[in-house]
Image (tube, rainbow, N blue to C red):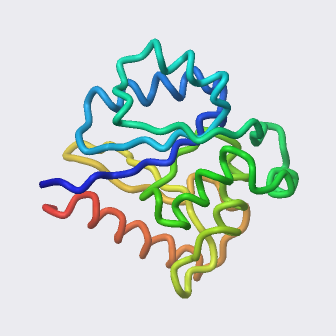
Amino acid sequence: MNKLIKIAVDAMGGDNAPNKIIDGIELHNRNSNNIYYRIFGNKEIIEPLISKKNIQKENYELIHTENRVEGDDSALAAAKKGKNTSMWLAIESVKNKTSNIIISAGNTAALFVISKLNLKMIENIDKPALSGLWPNKVGMNIVLDLGANIECNEKNLIDFSIMGSALYRSLFNNE
């Protein structure tokens, strides 16, 4: 039996949100098993969208908030908007262990700052890093940082390599 994975989704973050986000949930749901979506955003906007999609009600819950982080908000302004934004609530659900992961297509700087305020860093790791899957001729690579950090020292680069190798082993444990 596979364990149910609970994904917190910031439905209000990113271009064309929440339309594109709900489209993405529908697509992911169609091709996935044992996934439960905890969708954070404005119910009045999201419910009409989700009702037109092929997503079973037992596969998601909608957590209402009218507040959102805007794409042009500074990271500090986003954090000051506080605990009632869809991004903050989604991140907080990981902190409170009601979700396993969070997905947001929203403001990356705000995502980093709010995550750092809510979630613990790995011991002895100073900076978080964005990661991405990068295809190669025989499989996939993990690429870290992706330009999120303006300044990095030698320790940060070593930390990124440690985090990247750990992520690779967890995703591709047969290699």
Q: Quadrant of residue 48?
A: top right
Please name whichever residue, 51 or 91, is drawn nearer the observer in this view of the structure: 51
- Coordinates of residue 105 in the picture (x, y in percent): 59, 38
Q: Quadrant of residue 124?
A: bottom right
Does residue 109 sit above or below 106 in this rendering? Answer: below
* Quarter that holds the C terminus: bottom left
Q: Is residue 57 left or right of residue 84?
A: left
Residue at x 13%, y 61% (from the top left corner): 174
Please name whichever residue, 124 or 103, is drawn nearer the observer in this view of the structure: 103
- Coordinates of residue 70 in the picture (x, y in percent): 78, 37
> How many numbered circles does the render carry?
0
- Coordinates of residue 157 in the picture (x, y in percent): 55, 73
Q: Is residue 154 left or right of residue 84?
A: left
Q: Residue furthest front?
A: 58
Residue at x 65%, y 22% (from the top left corner): 45
* Quarter that holds the N terminus: bottom left
Does residue 118 sit above or below 70 in this rendering? Answer: below
Q: Residue furthest top?
A: 52
- Coordinates of residue 146 in the picture (x, y in percent): 57, 52
Residue at x 64%, y 36% (from the top left corner): 41
Q: Residue furthest bottom?
A: 124
Residue at x 35%, y 18% (from the top left corner): 54
Does residue 175 sit above or below 68 in this rendering? Answer: below
Does residue 161 sit above or below 60 in this rendering? Answer: below
